[in-house]
Image (cartoon, helix red, strand yellow):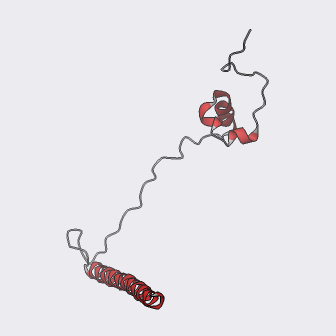
Amino acid sequence: MPSDERDPAPNRQIEPWELHSELVLVCPEVCERARELLPERDPDAFLARAREPVLVPATRTVDEPQQRSSLLVALVGYAIWRLLETARIALFTLTAVIVLALLGELLH
């Protein structure tokens, strides 16, 4: 009588490498053994904790706009940083073109 490949082997030991391979995804016996080895799940692990209240200083009200100076400083700083990065890349590109032109002249 031919044996069916899907019949589970009752006394089969599952090797540690099998637990850390793709067999966990396709083999029901290995998947079950991997689940047995998982630690006990904490049912409250993913509950959202209450946020701490945001305290507003007494000198201004909630309806007043926040200071925009930090936003302006951040925008100017970012613009300068991007300009310097662009200049750096342009310098590297120009240097590469000059080196290639000189190399072409030397080999010509």
Q: Residue at x 28, y 78 (%)?
A: 71
Q: Is residue 34 left or right of residue 44?
A: right
- Taking the view exactly as shown, the residue that stands out farthest to the top is 1
Of residues 37 and 21, the one drawn nearer to the viewer in this rendering: 21
Q: Is residue 87 left or right of residue 5?
A: left
Q: Is residue 40 left or right of residue 65?
A: right
Q: Residue at x 79, y 24 (%)?
A: 11
State whether residue 23 is above or below residue 6: below
Q: Position of residue 16 (x, y in %)?
A: 75, 41
State whether residue 106 is above or below residue 71: below
Q: Residue at x 20, y 68 (%)?
A: 63
Q: Position of residue 23 (x, y in %)?
A: 65, 35
The picture quadrant where one finds residue 89 is: bottom left
The quadrant in which the N terminus is found is top right
Q: Is residue 21 left or right of residue 11?
A: left
The quadrant in which the C terminus is found is bottom left
The picture quadrant where one finds residue 52 is: bottom left
The picture quadrant where one finds residue 5 is: top right
- Taking the view exactly as shown, the residue that stands out farthest to the front is 108
Q: Position of residue 12 (x, y in %)?
A: 78, 27
Of residues 36 and 51, the one drawn nearer to the viewer in this rendering: 36
Q: Position of residue 2 (x, y in %)?
A: 72, 12
State whether residue 65 is above or below residue 90: above
